[in-house]
Image: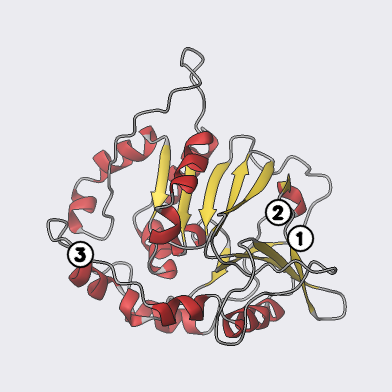
Amino acid sequence: MISSISSSKHNDADDNYFHPNLKGVFVGSGSEGMADPRVANAILDLLQEDDDSNGNLRPCCIWAPLPMIYPSFVRNRRKAHKKLQEADIIVVGGGNTLYAIDRWNHLGLVPLLRKAMERGTVLTGGSAGAIVWFDGGHSDSMDPDTYACPMVAQYGNASDKVEEVVDESKYKAMVSCERASDFDEMLLRHPGERGIGIDHWAALVINGESYSVLSLEGKPGSILASPSGKEFGVDESGNAKGVPGIWIKHVDGNGHVSSNVCHPNGLLSEILGVPSEIIRESDDVKRCREANPSGVKI
């Protein structure tokens, strides 16, 4: 499950805040979720249709990786910027959330990404690759295994075949009650924010001012059918007993975290508020940046 934060402070006079060309698919898991054909279809469904094209045909995709961690990206920045300007889909992989955001800012990519959104480019990613598109998030950016140097050492040589081993204990930790409780504690430190918890096998699909929830059938999740519609279907060992879905959380007037299952579809303004500055940055962020600086040369 990924957990992201968006400001819930809403300006009622600004009913059209969300850009009409905003399109995205934000998945709870990284490689597993993004590799599911149903997620790929959801991404392709958001592509703007060519008036002269046959609606029954799928577009042919050309993959253009942008390894922003390497000096070659900096040397060829103009060429890399051109790729972003021409992209129909921008995919962000999983990994270290804080490093990715800091790296974008370090390289001056944020304005280009915003322009891409405004022209209708589909924004997508899983795990950290989904959190980065929000104002803030609940992430494990202090995990040293996700720091730049270890990641490059493990995956840096594209010619080497890397066999990915799924660590069952890490998966259970991601969907556990312990992480959900920690996220609630984070929200209490950000009472003006709204939290979005996306299950490992679920995705938030955004198309302009509307959204839908993609729940991958046949996969486990945290949503249990109950009269209240609020039962969290994950036990203390991290075993998911329900179906995949999305939770919307906020701090109510009594100072308690309110959790509700996100409706399958609706208006984006019903689950997201107008973005603003995060109220208070975590005390651990500075230490994390010192241990894994975004300007480091690999």
**Secondary element at image label 1:** loop
Quarter holding the N terminus is: bottom right
Q: Crowding at label 3, few (<14), some or many (≥20) Cα neighbours within 10 Å?
A: few
Are the residues at dot 1 and dot 2 in contact (C-beta closer than 8 Å)?
yes
Q: Camera-side residue: 64 or 174?
A: 174
Task: Decide if residue 102 is on the left or right side of residue 3.
Answer: left
Give, as a three-letter code, the residue at label 2: Val
Q: In the image, what residue occupies the spot 82% across and 81% down?
A: 255
Q: Which mark is residue 162?
A: 3
Q: Residue furthest front?
A: 218
- Which callout, 1 or 3, points at the residue further toward the start of the chain? 1
Please give left or right for residue 255 compared with residue 298 in the image. right
Front position among marks 2 and 3: 3
The x, y position of residue 259, in whole percent, is 75, 71
Mark 2 lies on a secondary structure that is: loop
- Looking at the rendered structure, the secondary structure element under dot 3 is loop
Q: Which residue is mark 2?
A: 274
> What colour scheme does the image use?
secondary structure
Q: Quadrant of the C terminus?
A: bottom left
- Residue 80 falls in which quadrant of the image? top left
Label 1 to label 3: alpha-carbon separation: 44 Å
- Residue 123 position, x and y percent, is 48, 45
Compare marks 2 and 3 and give the one earlier in the sequence. Answer: 3
Q: Nearer the viewer, residue 13 or 168?
A: 168
Residue 94 in the image: above or below residue 257: above
User: Which amino acid does the dot numbered 1 rest on?
Assistant: Lys
* Kind of residue sitting beneath label 3: Val
Q: Quadrant of residue 247?
A: bottom right
Q: Name above or below for residue 118 compared with residue 206.
A: above
**Which label sits on residue 9?**
1
How far is the residue under mark 2 from the one under mark 3? 41 Å
Q: Residue at x 74, y 49 (%)?
A: 269
